[in-house]
Image (spheres, coloured by chain):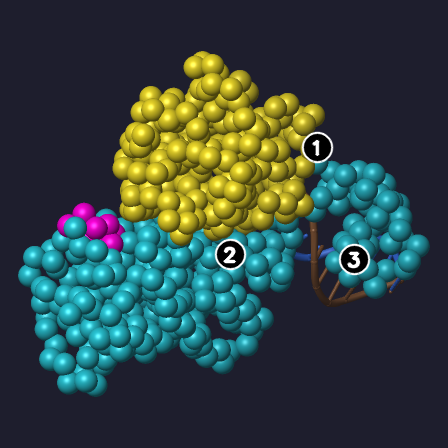
Chain colours: A yellow, B cyan, C brown, D blue
Amino acid sequence: MPTIKDVAKLAGVSTATVSRAMMSPEKVSEKTRLKVELAVAESGFSPNVIARNLRRSESKTIVIIVPDIANMFFASIVRGIQQVALQNGYKVLLGDSIHTVEQAKVYMDLVRSKQADGIISLTAELPMEIRQGTEIPMVMACEYFPGFPIPTVRIDNRGSAKRAVDYLLDIGHSQIGCITGPMENPICVDRKAGYQDSLQQLNIPLDEAAFEDGDFSFQSGYSAFMRLHEHYSMTALFCFNDMMALGAMKAATQLGIKVPQQLSIVGFDDLLFAEYTNPELTTIRQPQEDIGKTAANTLMKILQGSKASQDTIVPTQLLVRSSCCAPSK
Amino acid sequence: MPTIKDVAKLAGVSTATVSRAMMSPEKVSEKTRLKVELAVAESGFSPNVIARNLRRSESKTIVIIVPDIANMFFASIVRGIQQVALQNGYKVLLGDSIHTVEQAKVYMDLVRSKQADGIISLTAELPMEIRQGTEIPMVMACEYFPGFPIPTVRIDNRGSAKRAVDYLLDIGHSQIGCITGPMENPICVDRKAGYQDSLQQLNIPLDEAAFEDGDFSFQSGYSAFMRLHEHYSMTALFCFNDMMALGAMKAATQLGIKVPQQLSIVGFDDLLFAEYTNPELTTIRQPQEDIGKTAANTLMKILQGSKASQDTIVPTQLLVRSSCCAPSK
DNA sequence: CTGAAAGCGCTAACAT
DNA sequence: ATGTTAGCGCTTTCAG
C-alpha cells in the first residue's frame, strides 16, 4: 500500500502539501492540487485512517449498544442511526450487550481507548458509573433510567399505553389482561402506569391478577398468556410489545379462543410483521427510524461540543387493525 | 487521559516495560509487573488502541456487509459472527449496503484504509473487481457468486428447495405455485432448479406460469401471490423465504382462501416468527447462527494466514408445521 | 502557497 | 530483565 510519502515523491511536493490537497483543497494552488490528484490516482493511494485518527485523536466511529440483536425492534432504529451517521462521516459499530452490563461496559470502553467517539445505547442496562455523569459522549434511545444524566430520545410510554387501553375501553371491554415486560425496566413501569391511568379514569378497580410478566420475546408472550388464562378471565389483552402479542395470539388460538371475537389483542411497537399477522395486529406505532435519526443527530451535536442537549419525546400513534372488536355479549 | 508515559513515570520504569507488562507479562519480573499494575490502576490508564493499531498495522476489527439490515434473516447470523469474533479479540462493524455495490465498496475500503482487517459479506452484490481475486481477507455467507474466488459458507439451496417441494408432492399436491426471489441472484436460480428437479422426477410438466418473482419482503410476497392467483390455479405454494410466505398467507386469507385447507404453504429460512404465524409455517430451516459462526471462523483462519480455506456447506432441515395438508379432493 | 519538522501513543528491535 | 531508540502514517504548527 502506498503511503502519503509515495504520493508526495510522485507529485514532486512535500507530504504536507499532499495532506493539504486532500483535507483542505482551498489552501493549495490549483496547479499543485491537480498534480497531487494525479499522483493519488496513479499510485492508488488510500489514506491510512488509523494514522489520521491517531494524529487527530478521533475515530469518526460511533457505537450502538443493543441489548439483543435478534430483537427485531432494533433493526429499523439501527438503520436510522446508520443513515445520519454516514451522512456526517461517521462509521457505526454495532454491539450486542446480550442484556449484560459487563458487555455494555466493554463497548463503552471503546470510547476510552479512542476506538470510538461516542455511544448510542438502546438499553438502560448500563454500568452504574454513569450515574454520576460520564465524560463519554452518549445518548440513550427508547429506554431510560431515572437519574442517569444522559440525553434520551424516547416516546411517552405512559401516555401511549393509556391510549391503547383507552381504545379497548372505548369499544366496550372492561376485563383487560396485560402482559408486561420486565418490571425492573422503567419503560415497563411507565406503561403499566398508563394502563392503570386508563382504568382509573372510569373507576374500574385494578386487579393485580390481570398482569403477567414477559421478557419481550415471542416465547414469553406465549407462556405468559397461558399463565394469565389460568387465573384471569378477560375479553381483551394489552401486550407491551408486538412479539409477545404474537406469542399470546398463538397461545389463544391453541386454546381455541378466537381472536378477535373472544379476545381482542393490542400490541406495542408496530414491527414490520404486525400487519401480516392473522388477524392483523392493532398496535401502538413507534417511529423507529425517526428515533434512530434523532438519537444520532443528538449525538452528532454533542460530538460537536454543544452542551445543552435535551431529552426528546417523539410521538406515537395508535394503529387500529383487525385484532380487536367489541366484546361479545 | 493518561498515556503509557504517565504510567511509566508513576511506576518508575520505562514505557517499554509498561508495554511488555501488559502485552507479554512473562517477559517481565514479578516485582516490576506488580509495580506497573499498580500504576495502571492508580492512573486509570487505558491504552490508546488506535496508536497500538497503527504501530502493529492491524485493527482487530471485521466488517459485516448486509444488504438490508431490516431483513430479519440476518440478525441471528450477525449474532453468530459477533460471538466468535469477540472470542478472538475482534470487534465487529456492521455495514448496511442497502443492496448497492457502491455502499459495499465503501465498506470494503475500510480494509484498504486499515480500519478493518477483514470482511464477511452476506450479499453477493459486490464490486466486480473481486472477480480477479482480491487481496482483501474476505468470506461470503449465504450468498455466492459463481466465479468469485472467495470462500463461502452456505447451504445446498438446490437440494433444500427440492426437499421442500418433494414434501408437497408427497402429501399429494401437483399444482404448486412458486414465489421466487430476484432471479439475478444465484441462490434463487438454485432454488428454482431444485423446484424443477422435484417435479421432473415425477414427470410433472413444468409450467412457467407457476412462478412469480418477489424481492424477499413481506410486501412482495403479498403482491406476488395476488398476481399468481390471477393466472395460476394451485393447491400449494412454495416461497423462497418466510417473509414472502407470510405476505402470501395474508393475501390468501384476504381472498378467502383457507390455509392450509385450500392452500398449503412452505417457506424458507425458519425465522423466529415462523412458528408464531397462524397457521404455523412449514419451512426449510437454515442454521443461521451456525452459518455466522462458521463464516467467522473461516475468516479468523484467513487472518491468521492460512491460505487453503474451502467452501463449506451447512445442512438444512425441513420443519413440518401446520401450514400444509393434503389437497382437498 | 509550500516545506521542514515535530509529534499523536504505542510497540519492537536492539542494546545493555 | 529492562532501557534506548526508532519509527507506524498522518496532520499541523511554524517559517519562509
Q: Which residue is mark 2?
A: B79
Instruction: Report in which chain the residue with disc 3 lies.
Output: B
Could you tell whether B15 is left or right of A295 in the image? Answer: right
**Residue at the spot 63% in from the left edge and 45% down from the top edge:** A100
For residue B20, the mark is: 3
Q: CA distance from mark 3 to mark 1?
A: 30 Å
Answer above or below: position of A13 versus A171: below
Image point 51% across, 56% down: which residue?
Answer: B79
Q: Position of residue C13 (x, y in %)?
A: 73, 67
Whether residue A68 is visible, yes or no, is yes
Q: Which range of residues does the magenta coloring cover?
A: B247-255
- Residue A148: x and y, percent? 62, 26
Displayed quadrant of residue B173:
bottom left
Residue A8 vs residue B220: left or right?
right
What SS does tag 3 mark? helix
Which residue does the image show at 84% across and 48% down from the upper left? B37
Quadrant of the image containing the N terminus of chain B = top right
Secondary structure of the magenta portion, mostly?
A: helix
The amino acid pointed to by label 3 is Arg
Q: Residue furthest right?
A: B31
Residue at 41 percent of width and 72 percent of height: B317
Q: Find residue B17 and report its horizontal and vertical position in percent.
A: 82, 54
Provide residue B191's location: percent of width, then percent of height. 26, 72
Q: Please give the residue where the numbered disc 1 appears in the rendered image.
A: A129
Marked residue chain, label 2? B
Q: Chain of mark 1?
A: A
Q: Is residue A224 magenta?
A: no
